[in-house]
Image (spheres, grey):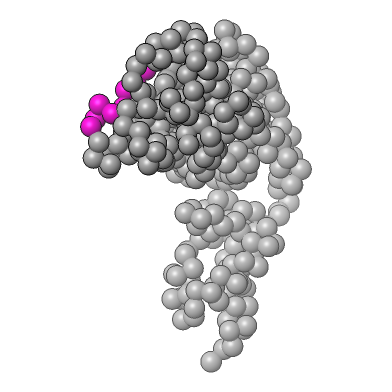
Amino acid sequence: MKSRKNKTQEIYEFLKKEIEAGTYEMGELLPTDLQISEKFSTSRPTVAKAVQRLVEENVLGRKAGFGTYLKNKPQTAGSNEQITLGLLIPSLGETEIFEPICAQIASLADSHNFNLLWGNAGSSLNNSTAVAEKLAYKYVQEEVDGVFFTPLELHDDSDEVNARILELFKKAHIPVILLDRDVAKAPLKSEYDLIGINNVEAGFLIGSHLIERKCQSIAFITRPNIASTVHMRLMGLREAILQAKLSHDSVEEIMVDDDIAELAKIIAPKDFDALAVYNDAAAAELSMALNDLGINIPDDIKICSFDDVKYAKLLKTPLTTYRQPCRDIGSTAVEIMMSRIQNPGMTARKVLLHGELIIRESSK
């Protein structure tokens, strides 16, 4: 019988040989530890040690809930040629979560041998549709190798513009990785790779937390033409209400345009226990507007939100919020982009990462 050490080496050499032979494409999942352990008649910890060696060599990657995948192929002639990737993020500069996501993508440029074009498509909300389309044309003309794209929202024609941009890249055979949100309406999935969070889970955790705080009348604050991610958060909140066996009327959806102060005046006389707001920026503004009306948070009304931007903990009443794993979103986006470039025909992936509910004074 082989020693455990020799068995680990045997598995390591077998996997490395398979990889070098081209058995797996970039990003493709390897057999599970259980499957490998059964093949070699050994324990899963022994397999894990062999796999970990390849992880440490930056050949394999491992993600909880995703599996073990090929991270880097052995170098071949011409494979070290630098590629160019573009960012098309209309919300950059307006929605704080995209700054750390893009920064993480940029930080991986050297290790993954790519040049990153920032584009700066989100300079003004009023003309971001036109600017985004113009930048898309520019990327096609420059023949970039791939684009990270956050679909437009909050415009009457967002869906049409998103479709035109994606069709432009498709005709040019430029791979696209969607960040944060899909172009398909939930729960449908588009043909493109998507990296984001599980928004249904996020809404469910917010709802469960508020229910634990004895809240039975919750207003969900949203906006017209907003991304489907926000609708999924509302779905999660409603599921929490359902599982708690509370009335369906326990959640009321309220639509707001830009006038948060006016919204506060509408909310103030109503008998809500809590507000779940579509993002931290709106929650912060609403919190201040309610304070100006003499409403105490959290004694009179509790507030929760999504994203955990930097100033969420710096407000007069620090904000309870669902933290997005921005660095992990950026890293995963790069991994999927490299896989897509290496294997254009692979099935589109929808990778939803787990965030974390950060409980602060606004809901206590």
Residue 241 versus residue 59 in the image, above or below: above
Residue that sits furthest to the right in the current view: 110
Confirm whether residue 128 shows in the render.
Answer: yes
Q: Residue at image x 65%, y 68%?
A: 53
300 displayed left or right of 60: left
Number of numbered tags placed on the structure image: 0
Image coordinates for residue 95, horizontal then vertical, percent: 59, 24
Q: Tell me where residue 254 sits by quadrant.
A: top left
Q: Nearer the viewer, residue 251 or 33?
A: 251
Q: Residue at image x 74%, y 47%?
A: 111
Q: Residue at image x 73%, y 40%?
A: 107
272 displayed left or right of 344: left
Q: Nearer the viewer, residue 20 or 128?
A: 128
Q: Tell me where residue 24 sits by quadrant.
A: bottom right
82 displayed left or right of 150: right
Residue 316 versus residue 155 in the image, above or below: below
Q: Is residue 248 magenta?
A: yes
Q: Residue at image x 49%, y 26%?
A: 297
Q: Is residue 252 magenta?
A: yes
Image coordinates for residue 338, horizontal then vertical, percent: 61, 43
Specify start and end residues of the magenta stretch as a single range.
247-256
Residue that sits furthest to the bottom in the current view: 1
Confirm whether residue 88 shows in the render.
Answer: no
Image coordinates for residue 236, horizontal then vertical, percent: 36, 36
Q: Nearer the viewer, residue 349 or 305?
A: 305
